[in-house]
Image: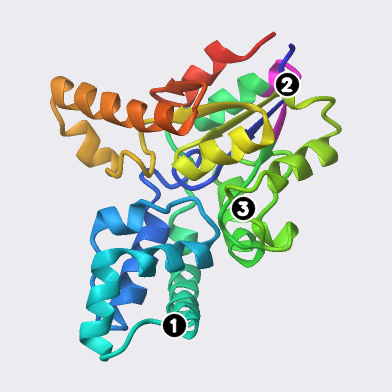
C-alpha cells in the first residue's frame, strides 16, 4: 500500500545523536539522591514516558538495593516523583543544546516531502520540553508537519499507540497500512507494533547504540559492523519490520 505518512521519533532519531539529553538528566537526578546508575540502567527504558522511565529504573534489582542501603528503606512512589521532578529540572536546562538534527536528516526529510508523503512525529518528551526542542530544531533546519507528546494523550506515552493515532487523525491518513514509524528505541518499535504500522529501527546515533558520533566514527569498520549487528538483533527481537543504518535507508523502504 502506498506510503502516506512517516512518523519519526525525536531524540536519537532525527535530533540529538546518541540521545544524550535524557541520559545526562537521569544520571544527575539519581546522583542527587545518592544513587549512581549505570549507562545500561539508564538506556534500557529509553523512549518511555519519562515518569515511567524513572519508575522502571527504580524497580531494577541493583538500584532498588542501593536505595535501601542509602536511605534505609524501600523506595516509594513519592521517591519516583521526586527523582522525576529533579530530572525534569535538569533536562529543561540542557535541552536547547541537544536539538541539532542528526546527519542526513534534513536532506532525507526534504526528499520524502518531495514524494508527497506527510511527516509526523511522536516523542517521550513532554509538551514543555518540546516547546524548547521543536523551535530550536526548526531553526537548525528540521521540522515535521506535526508532533504529539504524551501530554496530548493523557500521559499515555509509549508503548501505547495513541500518539501515532493522533498523528494519523491530524494528517488525515487513511490506514495504518500506509504509515511507517521510525525510531531508535525498543519503546519506539513497540509503539509502532501496537499501532499496527510498519516499523523501522535506526542504528547510527540511536539510544540502543549509545555512542556519540565521535565515539562511533573512532571505531574500526569491524567494530562498527559488530555493533550494528547487535543493535539490529535488539530491534528485530522487539518486532521491527526493518532496520536501517541511518535515516537515508528509509527511502529504500517507502512504498511508492
Q: Quote the CA–CA distance across marks 3 and 1.
A: 34 Å
Q: Earlier in the sequence, mark 2 or mark 3?
A: 3
Q: Percent from the top left, x then y, of residue 31?
A: 28, 77
Quarter the N terminus occupies:
top right
Q: Residues within 10 Å of mark 3 (few under 14, many from 20)?
A: many
State whether residue 35 appears in this view.
Answer: no
* Residue plotted at (32% across, 64% down): 60
- Residue 94 is drawn in which quadrant? bottom left
Instruction: Check disc 2 and report its element: helix, strand or loop.
Output: helix
Quarter the C terminus occupies:
top right
Q: Residues within 10 Å of mark 2 (few under 14, many from 20)?
A: some
Q: Earlier in the sequence, mark 1 or mark 2?
A: 1
Residue that badge 2 annotates:
177
- Residue 42 is drawn in which quadrant? bottom left
Image: 22 above or below 5: below
Looking at the rendering, the stretch of residues picked out in magenta corresponds to 113-119
Q: Quote the CA–CA distance across marks 2 and 3.
A: 28 Å
Q: Percent from the top left, x then y, of residue 207?
A: 38, 44
Image: 163 above or below 156: above
Q: Quote the CA–CA distance across marks 1 and 2.
A: 42 Å
Q: Percent from the top left, x then y, of residue 20?
A: 36, 54
- Which disc, if any, is residue 172? none
Residue that badge 3 annotates:
134
Residue that badge 1 annotates:
76
Image: 39 above or below 221: below
In screen coordinates, is 154 left or right of 250? Answer: right
Question: Number of callouts in the render?
Answer: 3
Amino acid at each position: 500500500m502506498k506510503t502516506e505518512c512517516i512518523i519519526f521519533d525525536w531524540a536519537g532519531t532525527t535530533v540529538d545523536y546518541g540521545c544524550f539529553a535524557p541520559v545526562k538528566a537521569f544520571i544527575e537526578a539519581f546522583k542527587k539522591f545518592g544513587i549512581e546508575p549505570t549507562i545500561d540502567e539508564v538506556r534500557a527504558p529509553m523512549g518511555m514516558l519519562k515518569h515511567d522511565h524513572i519508575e522502571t529504573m527504580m524497580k531494577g534489582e541493583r538500584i532498588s538495593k542501593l536505595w535501601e542501603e542509602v536511605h534505609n528503606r524501600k523506595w516509594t512512589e513519592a521517591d519516583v516523583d521526586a527523582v522525576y521532578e529533579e530530572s525534569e529540572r535538569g533536562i529543561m536546562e540542557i535541552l536547547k543544546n541537544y536539538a541539532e538534527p542528526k546527519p542526513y536528516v534534513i536532506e532525507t526529510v526534504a526528499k520524502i516531502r518531495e514524494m508527497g508523503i506527510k511527516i509526523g512525529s511522536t516523542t517521550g518528551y513532554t509538551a514543555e520540553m518540546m516547546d524548547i526542542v521543536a523551535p530550536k530544531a526548526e531553526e537548525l533546519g528540521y521540522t515535521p508537519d506535526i508532533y504529539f507528546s504524551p501530554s496530548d494523550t493523557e500521559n499515555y506515552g509509549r508503548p501505547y499507540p495513541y500518539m501515532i493515532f493522533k498523528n494519523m487523525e491530524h494528517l488525515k491518513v487513511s490506514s495504518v497500512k500506509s504509515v511507517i514509524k521510525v525510531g531508535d528505541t525498543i519503546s519506539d518499535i513497540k509503539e509502532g507494533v501496537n499501532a499496527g504500522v510498519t516499523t523501522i529501527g535506526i542504528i547510527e546515533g540511536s539510544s540502543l547504540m549509545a555512542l556519540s558520533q565521535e565515539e562511533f566514527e573512532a571505531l574500526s569498520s569491524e567494530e562498527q559492523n559488530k555493533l550494528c549487528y547487535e543493535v539490529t538483533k535488539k530491534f528485530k527481537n522487539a518486532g521491527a519490520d526493518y532496520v536501517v543504518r541511518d535515516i537515508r535507508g528509509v527511502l529504500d523502504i517507502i512504498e511508492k
